[in-house]
Image (cartoon, rainbow, N blue to C red):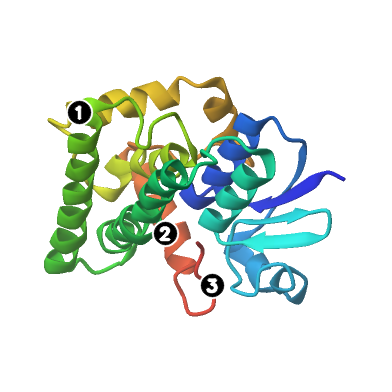
Amino acid sequence: MTMTLYTAATPNCYKVSVTLEELGLAYAVVKVDLAHGQQKTPDYLRINPNGRVPALVDDGFPIFESGAILVYLAEKTGLLMPSDVKGRSQVMQWLMFQMGGIGPMMAQANVFYRYFPEKIPAAIARYQGEGRRLFEVIDSHLASREFLAGDYSIADIANWCWIRTAKWSGIETDGLVNLQRWLATVAERPAVQRGIVIPEPPKSKDPDAEEAARLAEKARGMLEPGRREA
């Protein structure tokens, strides 16, 4: 039976569509309308009790949380993650680095830098600064290796889908030559190029002022209580 991906144009969602494309798995796509609260409907909450995207249903079995979905797919196929304990641990460490660090810090930078109508300089500096620090951690790590955890893996996919949007978060990557090399390497993969246009191309990484204002206004409405996207 074909898998079904419930998704939208967010970094967490692109993590799953890129992984599915890398694995060559057949899947159907259901675009979740975040602006109209489709992720909070009773039907969707039966798939993902947290009311966020993405979610995946595999032969009637629902999986939510993007990191958990990536691990499920890697373990199901035996690809994009080593089977030995230490190799698997390396991938999981860098996956958790994204889930607990890169994703939350960049998401908060987005909120304070782009979405909130009032600017709070201390909050913007806090999240952009921590985002840059995390980028520097990856840059140092990549000085002696091509990918984050040995071979290309779900750890690379998860981190790349967020870090590629650094300009939207207002986080500079200047001087991080290893990070920039890795970003370019992953971006060249055909499966990655297919995955980041499902269900639609992502917002511009470097929008002009008019486009940025329009995107920020749209996102602002989804930050209301009960309407937050992943």
Which residue carries the number 3 mark? 227
60 up-or-down from 91: above or below:
below
Q: Residue at x 58, y 34 (%)?
A: 195
Q: Residue at x 75, y 56 (%)?
A: 57
Distance in Å between CA atoms under marks 2 and 3: 14 Å
> Which quadrant would residue 178 be assigned to in this image?
top left
- Label 3: how many residues lie within 10 Å, few (<14), some (14-19) or many (20+)? some
- Nearer the observer: mark 2 or 1; the answer is 1
Q: Residue at x 73, y 35 (%)?
A: 25
Q: Hey, what amino acid is under mark 1?
A: Ala
Which numbered disc flags the more N-terminal residue, 3 or 1?
1
Give the percent coordinates (x, y) of residue 73.
Answer: 64, 46
Tell me, yes or no, whether the two marked residues, 2 and 1, touch with CB atoms within 8 Å.
no
Q: Hey, what amino acid is under mark 3?
A: Arg
Depth check, front residue: 78 or 10: 78
Mark identifier at residue 143: 1
Tell whether 41 sits left or right of 120: right
Tell whether 174 sits left or right of 42: left
- Nearer the observer: mark 3 or 1; the answer is 1
Furthest-right residue in this view: 1
Which numbered disc flags the more N-terminal residue, 2 or 1?
1
Distance in Å between CA atoms under marks 3 and 1: 40 Å
Which residue carries the number 2 mark? 217
Tag count: 3
Mark identifier at residue 103: none
Q: Hey, what amino acid is under mark 2?
A: Glu
131 up-or-down from 177: above or below:
below
Image quadrant holding the N terminus, namely: top right
